[in-house]
Image (tube, rainbow, N blue to C red):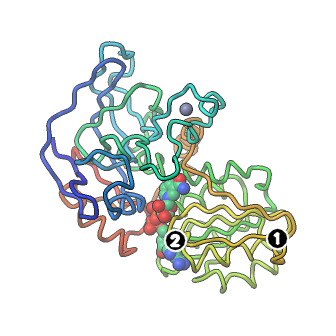
Amino acid sequence: MRAVQLVQWGAPVEVREIDDPQPNGTELLLRVDAAGLCLSDIHVMDTGAGVFDYPIPLTLGHEAAGTVIEVGPSADKSWLGRRVVVHGIWACRRCRNCVRGRENYCLRLARNPGAPLPRIGNGLGHHGGLAEKLLVPSDEVLVPTGDLDPALAAPLADAGLTAFHAIRMNHDLVDESTVAVVIGIGGLGHMAVQILSALDVASVIAVDKRPEARELASTLGCVAAHASVGEASEAVRSLGGADLVIDFAGAPSTVESAIGLLGPGGRLVVVGTAGGRVLVGKDLGLAQGWQVGAPFWGTRSDLTAVVELAASGRLSAETVEFALEDVPRAYELLRRGEVAGRAVVRPNG
Ligand code: NAD
Ligand code: ZN
């Protein structure tokens, strides 16, 4: 089968012919109907050897939707023929966080100081969905998607799930009177705007340096869209400050000033990883009760909720489709910020 693989750290991905995987034990084999490209893939491919404990060649693709076509001898055959999206966090399901339903913080996936980052799941340590077929360890990582178009289901696995989790963690601040700022209206951010509207938040203010992203934000119902945090600050201040600022860029120019947008009791949620740092301290004149968080991805039950939102028509990724052969070029477009919404591939046509 054809697969998009990272063959060398710090080098572009390659489309290669590799052997078809076979399911053993509890494993299931999916025909990949669609897979999404994430900016995180670029962070992975740009790093040097030794940062991640990932064997290469590695098939990328942590946003995958497909149809179960084969199951291992110990797997439940009733999954055959079902359409699913894959939860990319292949957790231990036994540690204290997994037992709490917080498998995105599974202790097995913990970063140990000085050690390479552990394998998380498909495309991030294990072979991923940018291939014609994908092997998953068990049905515990599958969420059924029914009739949902696979090209809309795939982006739910990360863009939708990470945005949903970042908002769900702050549900006590989310209602009709919430003032929310979403920074970075790309793959993740444009899903966050829709999730906030589905939760009846009327005042969502967008920040993005790209005019097309600001246009998308307005189409999705944002009350205003600004090119920088500085430009947004007056409007946010006139509303009493923000309850919630979610930064999907995480750049020095966004995250460092984003904390200044908070109103009393507000929270800054840092999702993007573009090298920005936040300085916090009790003596910096920040809003009373400030909180800063950096959630990681989301839980399987969050993914189920995200699929339900999409099935009800309230969450739909803007997608740009590419052929599997064109994925190296698509990553270059993503790197240059030239993809509107989410880049998606249908590996089987
Ligand atoms: P994307 O490229 O689709 O979107 C990023 C958006 O931010 C773009 O619209 C871009 O124009 C905007 N932006 C970038 N720098 C900016 C700046 N300085 N000022 C204003 N706008 C700016 O990327 P994506 O796939 O949505 O991913 C967003 C980030 O989230 C990435 O850093 C990715 O690694 C990270 N991520 C984190 C998690 C997590 O669990 N924490 C999960 C997935 C992705
Ligand atoms: Zn665990």
Residue on which disc 1 sits: 263
Ligand 1 contact, mark 1 (Cβ < 8 Å):
no
Rendering quadrant holding ligand 2: top right
- Indicate the position of residue 314 as horizontal and vertical percent values: 58, 51
Quarter of the rendering occupied by the N terminus: top left
Label count reads 2
Identified at 39% across, 15% down, the residue is 76
Identified at 31% across, 44% down, the residue is 129
- Indicate the position of residue 87 as horizontal and vertical percent values: 46, 38
- Residue 187 in sight here: no
Identify the disc placed on residue 275.
2
At label 2, which amino acid type do we have? Gly
Between label 1 and label 2, give the one nearer the viewer: 2
First in sequence: mark 1 vs mark 2: 1
Measured in 3D between alpha carbons, the distance from the residue under mark 1 to the one under mark 2, in whole angstroms, is 25 Å
- Indicate the position of residue 318 as horizontal and vertical percent values: 44, 61
Q: Quadrant of residue 127?
A: top left
**Few, some or many C-alpha atoms within 10 Å of disc 1 (few <14, some 14-19, many ≥20)?**
many
Find the residue positioned furthest to the left: 17
Identify the disc placed on residue 163.
none
Q: Nearer the viewer, residue 235 or 183?
A: 183
Identified at 17% across, 34% down, the residue is 20
In the rendered view, tell whether residue 118 sits above or below residue 276.
above
